[in-house]
Amino acid sequence: MLAKPHRGERSWRWSPKVGIPVGATGPVWIEVTKRMPEKKVSLKEIRAHVSYRKGTGKPICFFHGGVESKATWDKVTEVLTVNNPTFAIDARGHGQSERSPGGSYDFPSMISDASEFLKFIGEELIIVGHSMGATAAFFAAAENPQVVSGICLEDNTPLFELDPAISESSAVQGIKGIGAVAKQSVLEGEDAAELATKIGDLGPPNRKMKDNFPSWYLEAWAAELIQLDPRFTETFFENGPITNDLPAALKRLSCPIHLIYGEKGIVKNSHIEQMQALYSNFSAELIVGARHNVHTFHTHEFVRGLESFIHICEGK
């Protein structure tokens, strides 16, 4: 279930029906009661939309995954008990941020936007990135190591995007397929509920999306897909894997890097072993039963891991 936008707003917010006790685990509703103020930030090529919360301590910057938006972090910022300032940014072509001027969405552009945003914050901060946002924010951090105190990656490492077979992976092909359905739905003037029904029916007979994901999630995701520039999924990884130098990027960093990943997500054991071999200050935390979107369906477990990491980054 989603709350409709206020007059003049184009975004949909996560708005679950009921709250849950702190310490609960598993897929849950979390009531989002605090509407964070929002602002537009001018980056090199686009104006990005950012939600923020004032506080004390090192700022925490959230970067969402592909085909989502900054709204995906609303549940996390609601549950956080630390009082740090928080910032969540819509990637180009996602949510309320402007679309890519050239119509192509590649990692160099995403990394450039993330790097510009870190410069905009301009002080020591902690990065939290999921999926596409994890890799873009990681390489942006390597370009701005002087302002990064820690990097929390959610169910992804740059090794996924460096895989030569990335374009043919089931994850990327799935995103492309859902993007095509969303584009047609928008052309037909359908709303989020109608698109959510179509997404729910995707997949083989015994593994349809609606059998694996609750209706509230499909509706929330559909609302984000309606805002998405369809060219994102059409050009996503069209040029194959990224070509960034991971060892060189890690040499520029000295901050702790913590991975929170799902048992049923996209992170491979070999990815963890490679990261540990390349970087001594790398740690990993498994969330049992979780899929790729750990923060969405295992929010309290994710936040507990994140807050422990924040304390480490702040020397507490």
Image (cartoon, helix red, strand yellow):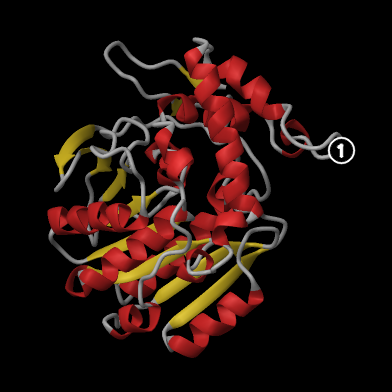
Asked if residue 56 is positioned above or below residue 6 in the image, the reply reads below
* Residue nearer the viewer, 282 or 316: 282
What's the residue at 52%, 13% (across, down)? 191
Q: Residue beneath label 1, please?
A: 206
Residue 78 visible (yes or no): no
Q: Which quadrant of the figure has residue 147?
A: bottom left
Q: Which quadrant of the figure has residue 195?
A: top right
Image quadrant occupied by the N terminus: top right
Q: Which quadrant of the figure has residue 180?
A: top right
Looking at the rendered structure, the number of numbered marks drawn on it comes to 1
* Amino acid type assigned to the residue bearing label 1 in the image: Asn
Horizontal arrangement in the rendering, residue 216 relative to residue 210 (left or right): left
* Residue nearer the viewer, 283 or 75: 283
Residue 36 visible (yes or no): yes
Asked if residue 190 is positioned above or below residue 11 in the image, the reply reads above
Residue that extends furthest to the right in the rendered view of this protein: 206
- Residue 313 is situated, as x and y percent measured from the top left of the image, at 33, 73
- Residue 197 is situated, as x and y percent measured from the top left of the image, at 67, 20
- Residue 238 is situated, as x and y percent measured from the top left of the image, at 46, 51
**Dot 1, crowdedness within 10 Å: few (<14), some or many (≥20)?**
few
